[in-house]
Amino acid sequence: MTFKINSILITLIFISLIITILIYPALPEKIPTHWNIKGEIDAYGNKNFIFLTALLPIIVYLLLIYIPEIDPRKNSYLKHQKTYTILINILIPFFILLQWISILSALGYELNISRIIPLAVGILLMVIGNYMGQIRPNYTFGIKLPWTLADETVWKKTHRVGGFVFILIGFIFILAGIINQTYSFILAIFCTFIALLYVGIYSYREYKKLH
């Protein structure tokens, strides 16, 4: 199936791209490309790099729109079309946000990265987690483990549990952003690792019960 082009998202992407082109001459020769766990800039790149981040949302958007056409389990998208659309609608603004964090930082604006990023990631994870139980077996998105792809029952159970886990992790990231301390972000990452490990083990055990 082919998903309809979202005119609002396309407009946002091109507005962001046009403003990037207009602002480009004002950017310094080196722009921030990475921040450490404390929210401090620890890597710079040539300012031409900003065009890559500006084009990334449209590249990702087009891939997400057309990948269902080549997915071996493309019929699943008929069942989780709403969830997939929501994923696209929240993921693209997230990429645009990352681009403008880089631009505004390069222009000298003081941004609290250690607060902004955890909050944005937390919201992203909570939204995805809320709809994860509706995702049906496919090769594009979801918890794609050998045993979830091999058994639809295991897939459904894994994604129901995974949905709660993603919501919980998202909530922890939001708390980390509110607390805005280095230890809180480290704790959020640690909790993410443990939670994903739990989902993987749970999923495998459910598969072994059935096989």
Image: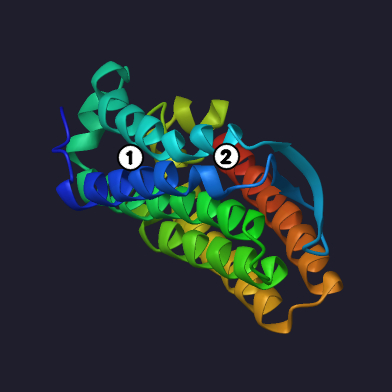
Mark 2 is surrounded, within 10 Å at the Cα level, by few (under 14), some (14 to 19) or many (20 or more) other residues, namely: few
Q: Residue at x 63, y 42 (%)?
A: 205
Residue 171 appears left or right of 73: right
User: Label 1 to label 2, Cα distance in Å?
Assistant: 21 Å
Q: Judge whether residue 90 can be spotted in this image.
A: yes
- Name the outermost residue toward the bottom: 179
Nearer the observer, 200 or 179: 179
Residue 16 appears left or right of 120: left
Q: Which residue is drawn at 80% across and 59% down?
A: 190
Q: Where is residue 36 in the image (x, y as percent from the top left)?
A: 81, 54
Which type of secondary structure does the marked residue at label 2 adopt? helix
**Relative vertical location of residue 167 with respect to residue 69 in this rendering, above or below:** below
Residue 174 found in image quarter = bottom right
Q: Position of residue 39 (x, y in %)?
A: 77, 63
Amino acid type, mark 2: Lys
Nearer the observer, 125 or 23: 23
**Relative vertical location of residue 30 with respect to residue 175 in this rendering, above or below:** above
Q: Position of residue 55 (x, y in %)?
A: 42, 34
Q: Which of disc 2 and disc 1 is earlier in sequence? A: 1
Q: Residue at x 41, y 49 (%)?
A: 91
Residue 29 appears left or right of 83: right
Which type of secondary structure does the marked residue at label 1 adopt? loop
Q: How is the image coloured?
A: rainbow
The numbered mark at residue 136 is 1
Residue 37 appears left or right of 176: right
Quadrant where the image shows the C terminus: top right
Amino acid type, mark 1: Arg
**Relative vertical location of residue 96 with respect to residue 124 in this rendering, above or below:** above
Quadrant where the image shows the N terminus: top left
Q: Which residue is under mark 2? A: 209
Q: Where is residue 38 in the image (x, y as percent from the top left)?
A: 83, 64
